[in-house]
Protein backbone atom coordinates (compact mmCIF):
# COMPACT_ATOMS: atom_id res chain seq x y z
CA UNK A 1 0.00 0.00 0.00
CA UNK A 2 1.33 3.47 -0.89
CA UNK A 3 2.25 5.79 1.99
CA UNK A 4 -0.46 8.32 1.05
CA UNK A 5 -3.13 5.61 1.06
CA UNK A 6 -1.87 4.13 4.30
CA UNK A 7 -1.99 7.53 5.97
CA UNK A 8 -5.56 8.09 4.76
CA UNK A 9 -6.66 4.73 6.14
CA UNK A 10 -5.04 5.42 9.52
CA UNK A 11 -6.62 8.87 9.74
CA UNK A 12 -10.03 7.46 8.88
CA UNK A 13 -9.70 4.60 11.36
CA UNK A 14 -8.46 6.90 14.10
CA UNK A 15 -11.55 9.09 13.72
CA UNK A 16 -14.03 6.24 14.19
CA UNK A 17 -14.26 6.76 17.97
CA UNK A 18 -15.35 10.38 17.57
CA UNK A 19 -12.67 11.87 19.85
CA UNK A 20 -10.27 14.56 18.78
CA UNK A 21 -6.52 14.07 19.39
CA UNK A 22 -5.15 15.70 22.52
CA UNK A 23 -2.58 17.43 20.30
CA UNK A 24 -4.35 18.81 17.23
CA UNK A 25 -1.01 18.94 15.39
CA UNK A 26 -0.30 15.23 15.92
CA UNK A 27 -0.35 13.19 12.72
CA UNK A 28 -0.73 9.38 12.75
CA UNK A 29 1.97 7.95 10.50
CA UNK A 30 2.47 4.30 11.50
CA UNK A 31 -0.13 1.75 12.58
CA UNK A 32 0.49 -0.40 15.65
CA UNK A 33 -0.45 -4.03 15.09
CA UNK A 34 -2.59 -5.84 17.67
CA UNK A 35 -1.00 -8.49 19.87
CA UNK A 36 -2.41 -11.35 21.96
CA UNK A 37 -2.83 -10.64 25.68
CA UNK A 38 -4.16 -13.12 28.22
CA UNK A 39 -7.24 -14.71 26.60
CA UNK A 40 -7.72 -11.94 24.02
CA UNK A 41 -6.18 -12.06 20.55
CA UNK A 42 -6.64 -8.38 19.83
CA UNK A 43 -4.88 -6.03 22.27
CA UNK A 44 -2.62 -3.02 21.82
CA UNK A 45 0.60 -2.49 23.77
CA UNK A 46 2.06 1.00 24.17
CA UNK A 47 5.47 1.17 25.80
CA UNK A 48 8.25 3.68 26.43
CA UNK A 49 11.44 3.37 28.54
CA UNK A 50 9.56 4.02 31.81
CA UNK A 51 5.94 2.93 31.42
CA UNK A 52 3.78 0.44 29.59
CA UNK A 53 0.05 0.07 29.04
CA UNK A 54 -2.04 -2.63 27.38
CA UNK A 55 -5.49 -1.83 25.99
CA UNK A 56 -8.11 -4.51 25.22
CA UNK A 57 -10.94 -3.18 23.02
CA UNK A 58 -12.99 -6.36 23.53
CA UNK A 59 -13.73 -5.18 27.08
CA UNK A 60 -13.21 -1.44 26.57
CA UNK A 61 -10.47 -1.34 29.19
CA UNK A 62 -6.89 -0.52 29.86
CA UNK A 63 -5.90 -3.95 31.16
CA UNK A 64 -2.32 -3.32 32.28
CA UNK A 65 -0.27 -0.36 33.57
CA UNK A 66 3.38 -0.89 34.50
CA UNK A 67 6.11 1.40 35.77
CA UNK A 68 9.74 0.54 35.04
CA UNK A 69 8.91 -3.12 34.45
CA UNK A 70 7.03 -3.58 37.72
CA UNK A 71 3.95 -5.71 38.17
CA UNK A 72 0.81 -4.09 36.82
CA UNK A 73 -0.95 -1.57 39.01
CA UNK A 74 -4.27 -2.94 37.81
CA UNK A 75 -6.26 -5.91 38.97
CA UNK A 76 -7.40 -8.02 36.02
CA UNK A 77 -9.56 -11.13 35.97
CA UNK A 78 -9.07 -12.44 32.45
CA UNK A 79 -10.91 -15.69 33.18
CA UNK A 80 -14.39 -14.17 33.26
CA UNK A 81 -16.78 -15.02 30.46
CA UNK A 82 -20.32 -13.80 29.91
CA UNK A 83 -22.71 -12.30 27.42
CA UNK A 84 -24.02 -8.89 26.43
CA UNK A 85 -26.64 -8.94 29.20
CA UNK A 86 -24.09 -9.07 32.03
CA UNK A 87 -21.56 -6.64 33.47
CA UNK A 88 -18.37 -8.46 34.47
CA UNK A 89 -15.83 -7.26 36.99
CA UNK A 90 -12.81 -7.78 34.77
CA UNK A 91 -10.95 -5.05 36.64
CA UNK A 92 -8.58 -2.77 34.76
CA UNK A 93 -9.41 0.84 33.95
CA UNK A 94 -12.76 1.71 32.37
CA UNK A 95 -15.42 4.40 32.07
CA UNK A 96 -19.11 4.35 32.98
CA UNK A 97 -21.28 6.91 31.14
CA UNK A 98 -24.09 6.98 33.73
CA UNK A 99 -23.73 7.82 37.43
CA UNK A 100 -24.62 5.05 39.90
CA UNK A 101 -27.26 7.30 41.44
CA UNK A 102 -29.20 6.89 38.15
CA UNK A 103 -29.07 3.09 38.07
CA UNK A 104 -32.06 2.49 40.34
CA UNK A 105 -34.31 4.46 37.98
CA UNK A 106 -32.98 2.43 35.06
CA UNK A 107 -32.99 -1.05 36.61
CA UNK A 108 -34.68 -0.98 40.00
CA UNK A 109 -31.46 -1.16 42.04
CA UNK A 110 -28.06 0.49 42.18
CA UNK A 111 -26.17 -2.82 41.79
CA UNK A 112 -25.32 -4.64 39.60
CA UNK A 113 -24.98 -2.18 36.73
CA UNK A 114 -28.12 -2.02 34.59
CA UNK A 115 -28.38 -3.99 31.37
CA UNK A 116 -27.69 -0.97 29.08
CA UNK A 117 -24.21 -0.79 30.68
CA UNK A 118 -23.51 -4.52 30.27
CA UNK A 119 -20.41 -5.87 28.55
CA UNK A 120 -20.06 -5.35 24.80
CA UNK A 121 -17.00 -5.15 22.53
CA UNK A 122 -15.52 -1.79 21.63
CA UNK A 123 -13.82 -1.03 18.32
CA UNK A 124 -10.18 -0.03 18.54
CA UNK A 125 -7.10 0.97 16.61
CA UNK A 126 -3.59 2.14 17.52
CA UNK A 127 -0.86 4.14 15.82
CA UNK A 128 2.31 6.18 16.31
CA UNK A 129 2.21 9.93 15.74
CA UNK A 130 4.89 11.73 13.75
CA UNK A 131 6.50 12.92 16.99
CA UNK A 132 6.76 9.34 18.30
CA UNK A 133 3.78 9.47 20.67
CA UNK A 134 1.97 6.13 20.89
CA UNK A 135 -1.83 6.26 20.67
CA UNK A 136 -4.84 3.98 20.93
CA UNK A 137 -8.48 4.87 20.43
CA UNK A 138 -11.56 2.83 21.33
CA UNK A 139 -15.24 3.53 20.83
CA UNK A 140 -18.59 1.96 21.64
CA UNK A 141 -22.21 2.82 20.89
CA UNK A 142 -24.89 2.39 23.55
CA UNK A 143 -28.48 1.96 22.39
CA UNK A 144 -31.81 2.56 24.10
CA UNK A 145 -32.33 4.28 26.51
CA UNK A 146 -28.93 6.04 26.39
CA UNK A 147 -28.35 6.66 22.67
CA UNK A 148 -24.72 7.69 23.02
CA UNK A 149 -21.33 7.00 21.49
CA UNK A 150 -18.38 6.85 23.90
CA UNK A 151 -14.74 7.11 22.86
CA UNK A 152 -11.43 6.94 24.70
CA UNK A 153 -8.20 8.23 23.16
CA UNK A 154 -5.12 7.03 25.08
CA UNK A 155 -1.75 8.64 24.41
CA UNK A 156 1.52 7.53 26.03
CA UNK A 157 4.29 10.11 26.37
CA UNK A 158 7.39 9.33 24.34
CA UNK A 159 9.68 9.22 27.38
CA UNK A 160 7.96 10.18 30.64
CA UNK A 161 5.98 7.79 32.85
CA UNK A 162 2.79 9.58 31.86
CA UNK A 163 -0.21 9.05 29.64
CA UNK A 164 -3.47 10.83 28.95
CA UNK A 165 -7.00 9.52 28.40
CA UNK A 166 -9.20 11.81 26.33
CA UNK A 167 -12.81 10.72 26.88
CA UNK A 168 -15.89 11.81 24.97
CA UNK A 169 -19.62 11.07 25.01
CA UNK A 170 -21.76 12.15 22.06
CA UNK A 171 -25.54 11.84 22.07
CA UNK A 172 -26.75 10.08 18.92
CA UNK A 173 -30.54 10.35 19.47
CA UNK A 174 -33.06 11.76 21.93
CA UNK A 175 -32.71 10.57 25.53
CA UNK A 176 -33.65 11.89 28.97
CA UNK A 177 -30.79 10.08 30.74
CA UNK A 178 -28.00 12.47 31.87
CA UNK A 179 -24.47 11.26 31.21
CA UNK A 180 -21.19 11.51 33.09
CA UNK A 181 -17.57 10.54 32.45
CA UNK A 182 -16.95 8.33 35.49
CA UNK A 183 -13.50 6.78 35.14
CA UNK A 184 -12.43 3.91 37.40
CA UNK A 185 -9.01 2.30 37.89
CA UNK A 186 -9.04 -0.90 39.94
CA UNK A 187 -5.67 -1.09 41.71
CA UNK A 188 -4.51 -4.52 42.87
CA UNK A 189 -3.03 -4.63 46.36
CA UNK A 190 -2.87 -0.88 46.99
CA UNK A 191 -1.40 -0.02 50.38
CA UNK A 192 -2.67 3.58 50.57
CA UNK A 193 -4.93 5.99 48.72
CA UNK A 194 -4.36 9.76 48.77
CA UNK A 195 -7.41 12.01 48.46
CA UNK A 196 -7.30 15.81 48.04
CA UNK A 197 -9.14 18.09 50.42
CA UNK A 198 -10.25 21.56 49.39
CA UNK A 199 -10.50 24.60 51.67
CA UNK A 200 -14.09 25.26 50.54
CA UNK A 201 -15.35 21.69 50.93
CA UNK A 202 -19.00 21.22 51.89
CA UNK A 203 -18.02 18.05 53.75
CA UNK A 204 -17.03 18.30 57.40
CA UNK A 205 -13.70 16.48 57.01
CA UNK A 206 -13.20 17.39 53.38
CA UNK A 207 -14.41 13.96 52.34
CA UNK A 208 -17.74 12.18 52.53
CA UNK A 209 -18.48 8.51 53.26
CA UNK A 210 -20.70 7.30 50.42
CA UNK A 211 -20.95 3.78 51.86
CA UNK A 212 -20.10 2.34 55.27
CA UNK A 213 -18.92 4.39 58.23
CA UNK A 214 -16.31 7.13 58.05
CA UNK A 215 -12.85 5.61 58.71
CA UNK A 216 -11.32 6.46 62.08
CA UNK A 217 -8.11 8.44 62.50
CA UNK A 218 -6.00 5.30 62.37
CA UNK A 219 -7.31 4.55 58.89
CA UNK A 220 -7.51 8.10 57.57
CA UNK A 221 -4.60 10.44 58.24
CA UNK A 222 -5.23 14.17 57.87
CA UNK A 223 -2.39 16.06 56.16
CA UNK A 224 -4.00 19.47 55.77
CA UNK A 225 -4.33 19.63 52.00
CA UNK A 226 -5.03 15.90 51.64
CA UNK A 227 -6.05 12.73 53.45
CA UNK A 228 -4.24 9.40 53.30
CA UNK A 229 -6.32 6.23 53.58
CA UNK A 230 -4.81 2.95 54.81
CA UNK A 231 -6.08 0.35 52.30
CA UNK A 232 -4.63 -2.72 54.01
CA UNK A 233 -7.80 -3.58 55.98
CA UNK A 234 -11.52 -2.88 55.88
CA UNK A 235 -13.99 -1.63 53.28
CA UNK A 236 -14.86 2.01 52.63
CA UNK A 237 -16.11 4.31 49.87
CA UNK A 238 -15.19 7.98 50.15
CA UNK A 239 -15.45 11.01 47.92
CA UNK A 240 -13.94 14.49 47.78
CA UNK A 241 -15.35 17.66 46.23
CA UNK A 242 -11.89 19.20 45.82
CA UNK A 243 -11.66 21.06 42.51
CA UNK A 244 -8.02 19.99 42.28
CA UNK A 245 -9.46 16.84 40.74
CA UNK A 246 -6.76 14.26 41.46
CA UNK A 247 -6.55 10.98 43.34
CA UNK A 248 -3.60 8.64 43.90
CA UNK A 249 -2.80 5.11 45.04
CA UNK A 250 0.43 3.61 46.32
CA UNK A 251 1.43 0.06 45.50
CA UNK A 252 4.77 -1.05 46.91
CA UNK A 253 7.32 1.62 46.05
CA UNK A 254 5.34 3.19 43.21
CA UNK A 255 2.45 5.64 42.99
CA UNK A 256 -0.20 6.17 40.32
CA UNK A 257 -1.91 9.57 40.37
CA UNK A 258 -4.80 10.51 38.11
CA UNK A 259 -5.84 14.12 37.52
CA UNK A 260 -8.97 15.10 35.61
CA UNK A 261 -9.18 18.33 33.65
CA UNK A 262 -11.58 20.90 35.06
CA UNK A 263 -13.80 21.45 32.03
CA UNK A 264 -17.01 23.46 32.36
CA UNK A 265 -20.06 21.38 31.50
CA UNK A 266 -22.94 23.35 32.98
CA UNK A 267 -23.95 20.57 35.35
CA UNK A 268 -23.32 19.37 38.89
CA UNK A 269 -21.04 16.54 39.92
CA UNK A 270 -22.73 13.33 41.11
CA UNK A 271 -23.04 12.14 44.71
CA UNK A 272 -23.47 15.62 46.14
CA UNK A 273 -20.61 17.27 44.29
CA UNK A 274 -17.92 14.55 44.21
CA UNK A 275 -15.03 15.16 41.81
CA UNK A 276 -12.98 12.12 42.85
CA UNK A 277 -13.97 8.95 44.72
CA UNK A 278 -12.32 5.84 46.13
CA UNK A 279 -13.63 2.40 46.99
CA UNK A 280 -11.38 0.00 48.86
CA UNK A 281 -12.05 -3.61 49.80
CA UNK A 282 -9.05 -5.26 51.44
CA UNK A 283 -10.86 -8.62 51.50
CA UNK A 284 -11.11 -8.60 47.71
CA UNK A 285 -7.56 -7.26 47.41
CA UNK A 286 -8.15 -4.06 45.47
CA UNK A 287 -8.90 -0.35 45.71
CA UNK A 288 -10.57 1.79 43.07
CA UNK A 289 -9.52 5.35 42.31
CA UNK A 290 -12.18 7.26 40.40
CA UNK A 291 -12.62 10.62 38.67
CA UNK A 292 -15.95 12.14 37.68
CA UNK A 293 -17.08 14.87 35.34
CA UNK A 294 -20.20 16.89 36.00
CA UNK A 295 -23.43 15.32 34.77
CA UNK A 296 -25.05 16.70 31.66
CA UNK A 297 -28.25 16.04 29.74
CA UNK A 298 -27.11 16.06 26.15
CA UNK A 299 -29.22 16.78 23.12
CA UNK A 300 -28.52 14.90 19.85
CA UNK A 301 -25.17 16.00 18.43
CA UNK A 302 -23.94 17.48 21.72
CA UNK A 303 -20.95 16.03 23.55
CA UNK A 304 -19.29 15.86 26.96
CA UNK A 305 -15.53 15.39 27.20
CA UNK A 306 -12.59 15.55 29.57
CA UNK A 307 -8.96 14.52 29.81
CA UNK A 308 -7.35 12.45 32.55
CA UNK A 309 -3.58 12.72 32.99
CA UNK A 310 -1.97 9.70 34.65
CA UNK A 311 1.49 9.98 36.23
CA UNK A 312 3.58 7.16 37.69
CA UNK A 313 6.49 7.75 40.07
CA UNK A 314 8.60 6.09 42.72
CA UNK A 315 8.48 6.54 46.51
CA UNK A 316 9.73 4.65 49.53
CA UNK A 317 7.23 1.96 50.46
CA UNK A 318 7.29 3.05 54.12
CA UNK A 319 7.14 6.81 53.51
CA UNK A 320 5.15 8.51 56.31
CA UNK A 321 1.58 9.31 55.29
CA UNK A 322 1.87 13.09 55.06
CA UNK A 323 5.19 12.85 53.23
CA UNK A 324 3.41 10.63 50.72
CA UNK A 325 0.70 13.27 50.32
CA UNK A 326 3.40 15.90 49.84
CA UNK A 327 5.14 13.75 47.22
CA UNK A 328 1.89 13.51 45.25
CA UNK A 329 1.43 17.29 45.38
CA UNK A 330 5.03 17.84 44.32
CA UNK A 331 4.65 15.43 41.40
CA UNK A 332 1.61 17.43 40.27
CA UNK A 333 3.46 20.73 40.59
CA UNK A 334 1.01 22.11 43.13
CA UNK A 335 1.82 25.45 44.74
CA UNK A 336 3.12 25.76 48.32
CA UNK A 337 -0.12 27.44 49.46
CA UNK A 338 -1.93 24.10 49.49
CA UNK A 339 0.82 22.14 51.20
CA UNK A 340 0.24 21.04 54.83
CA UNK A 341 0.44 24.00 57.22
CA UNK A 342 3.66 24.36 59.19
CA UNK A 343 3.63 23.13 62.78
CA UNK A 344 3.26 25.92 65.37
CA UNK A 345 6.49 26.98 67.10
CA UNK A 346 7.36 25.27 70.36
CA UNK A 347 6.66 27.56 73.35
Image (cartoon, helix red, strand yellow):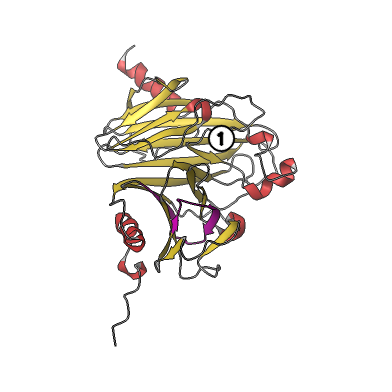
The magenta span reads 229-251
Q: Position of residue 91 (x, y in %)?
A: 50, 36
Residue drawn where x is 44% and y is 34% of the image: 62
Q: Position of residue 216 (x, y in %)?
A: 51, 64
Quadrant (top left/top right/bottom left/bottom right) for the N terminus: top left
Q: Is residue 297 left or right of residue 50?
A: right
Which secondary structure class fits the magenta region best?
strand
Q: Is residue 65 left or right of residue 279?
A: left
- Residue 74 in view, yes or no: yes
Hey, which residue is sitting farthest bottom in the picture?
347
Q: Is residue 75 left or right of residue 32?
A: right
- Is 18 rendered above or below residue 313? above
Which of 176/39 is in front?
39
Say which element carries label 1.
Answer: loop
Q: Position of residue 10 (x, y in %)?
A: 39, 23
Quadrant (top left/top right/bottom left/bottom right) for the C terminus: bottom left
Which of 264/250 is in front?
250
Hey, which residue is sitting farthest top in the picture?
1
Residue annotated with mark 1? 89
Q: Residues within 10 Å of mark 1 (few under 14, many from 20)?
A: few
Residue drawn where x is 72% and y is 42% of the image: 106
Residue drawn where x is 40% and y is 36% of the image: 154
Q: Is residue 68 left or right of residue 33?
A: left
Which of 112/191 is in front?
191
Amino acid sequence: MKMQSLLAVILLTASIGGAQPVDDNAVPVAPIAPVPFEKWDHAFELKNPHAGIVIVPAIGRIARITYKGSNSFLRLDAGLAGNDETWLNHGGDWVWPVAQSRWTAMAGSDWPPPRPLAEAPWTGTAWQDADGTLCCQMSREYGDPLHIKVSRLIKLDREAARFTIRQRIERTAESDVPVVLWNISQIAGASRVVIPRGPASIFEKGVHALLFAMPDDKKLTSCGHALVYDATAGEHKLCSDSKRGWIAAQKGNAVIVERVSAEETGGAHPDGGCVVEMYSNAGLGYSEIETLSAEKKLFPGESLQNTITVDLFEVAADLPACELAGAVSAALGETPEIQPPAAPPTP
